[in-house]
Amino acid sequence: METYILLGFVLILSIYLGLELIAKVPSTLHTPLMSGANAISGIALVGALILSRDSDLQNTIAFFAVTFASINVFGGYLVTNRMLKMFKKK
Amino acid sequence: MTFLSEITAIQNIIYIFSSILFITGIKMLGKEDTAVKGNFFSALAMFIAVSITLIDVVNPIVLLCGIALGAVIGSFIALKVKMTSIPEMVALFNGFGGLATFLIAWSEFNSIPDNLFQHVLVMTTLYIGGVTFTGSLVAYAKLSEKIKIAKTSIITKIFTTIFYISLPFLLYSTFVTPFIVTSFEFFTVLLVLTLLGGIGFVLPIGGGDMPVVISLLNSFSGIAAAFAGLLLLNNVLIVAGSLVGASGLILTVIMAKAMNRSISNILFVGYASSSASSSSSEEQGEVSPISVSDAYLILESASSVLIIPGYGMAVAQAQHVVRELGELLEENGTEVKYGIHPVAGRMPGHMNVLLAEANVPYDVLAEPDDVNPTMDAVDVAVVIGANDVVNPSATEEPGSPIYGMPIIEVHNAKTVFVLKRSMSSGFAGVQNPLFFKQNTRMLFGDAKESIGGLVSEFKD
């Protein structure tokens, strides 16, 4: 239980940190920020890698979770990068 | 310390390092000059976190195959997609992330949670992940116009009802089922209800409200990942997921504020019912149409022009001719600016991306607060396929459903050109008095053709 409280603390602090860091984002960057954050949410990939595998069902689930998270990661970062490269100053 | 726990300790230390990189990355992503680097840092953080996890997994070959497969599919989509389809691409990728957390929660349920807290986490992660998955797929289908289902259709109502059923069912299976022996598979029912409920969550939400929904789903996928991190006791999942949750939340709030509506109003009410009370949309006079050649003469003698793009520009794919027109005006000695409303288009920052694709530098793009105070000095405001975001009812008519919404006050400019296909009203279904103002000229027709016409007049 103590571990959960500690990790819950990390969760709250990270959300607060995130709100502070991104509060004043210029509207030019709304889409890249969203798409970049979307790529980060592919961190579920790490979670999918460490799933326990006691049964065939779990093996199958893990494989699909890894594949889809990986699409999210690669697709997300590449699209964000493509988009950001287009933004030019005068 | 045994060998295994040593590996876990090293992994956790590397995870902290990776979390710091994620935080730095997302911070840099919020500023124009550092955004490219920020994205790179966050990708690096992801690479480090995944690599260090891979040194100690159950069957690495299968997992590496999964990663490789995902990499090929993801990269293929990302590099092939047209810039105009970015909104639906983001929605699709977001859905896949949600699906991954949904699967994680499902798998964890099968390893039999050993305390109530874990059970609650499994259920919540499953629910948020599942709703993100199917919700994002519906958003994808709506944005790419693969499905067109009216808010009032029976299909929408069925799915919305399922969504409302799924919520109490979630609470029931979270808090009641662990204490009683259930006679049938509550979990399987919850799986199905969650996935169908996600459809019902997004289906009734209209096109103009899409920026809000996409931001919200983005936030959900982060929160789901963070919860999965709690479940798996993994700190990098928690930190990265929370950052995404926070950034999605900020965008959601910005979008809702730009429409002067509460988030719950957007999600659960929509414009249709809120506008029922004030249908004062009687004809407000004559509109004055203008031809391309007359519009050219006015533009040619203007010394300052403001261009206000909207979703119509995206539909007509007019961003390239718009840029061309802007350049010709500048060569002619006219000052050209673009007024971008935060909710113009179908996702946050939609217009910015389109104009960037057409090589319009981002420093001539201005927000409503920057252009409104000096609107009197603007000779011509050119409204291209925007409607509600320039509707003066928002400031003049307290009874209007969009009253109070911050707009770009083009009606204060000396002359307003409105490029429009017809006299139909905007997404909000509200008549726009701007069209009937003395200083407004309507340039009917396809935006791309009209502007192309102006461009060739300038070239002659």
Image (cartoon, grey):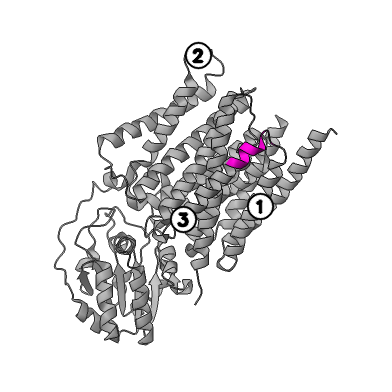
Which residue corresponds to the image point at 55% horizontal and 31% vertical from the top-left? A61
Which of pointers 2 and 1 lies earlier in the amino acid sequence?
Answer: 1
Which residue corresponds to the image point at 21% horizontal and 67% vertical from the top-left? B445
Q: Which residue is mark 1?
A: B45
Residue B333 versus residue B179 in the image, above or below: below
Q: Amino acid at mark 3?
A: Ile
Give the structural element (helix, strand or loop) at label 2: loop
Discs 3 and 1 lie in a common subunit: yes
**Left or right of B250 on screen, residue B373:** left
Residue B367 versus residue B108 in the image, above or below: below
**Residue B418, percent from left and from top:** 25, 69
Q: Is B176 in front, or is A58?
A: A58
Q: Quadrant of the N terminus of chain B?
A: top right
Per the image, is B60 magenta?
yes
**In contact (CB < 8 Å): disc 3 and disc 1:** no
Q: Which residue is mark 3?
A: B254
**Residue B88, percent from left and from top:** 41, 51
Residue B162 versus residue B348 in the image, above or below: above
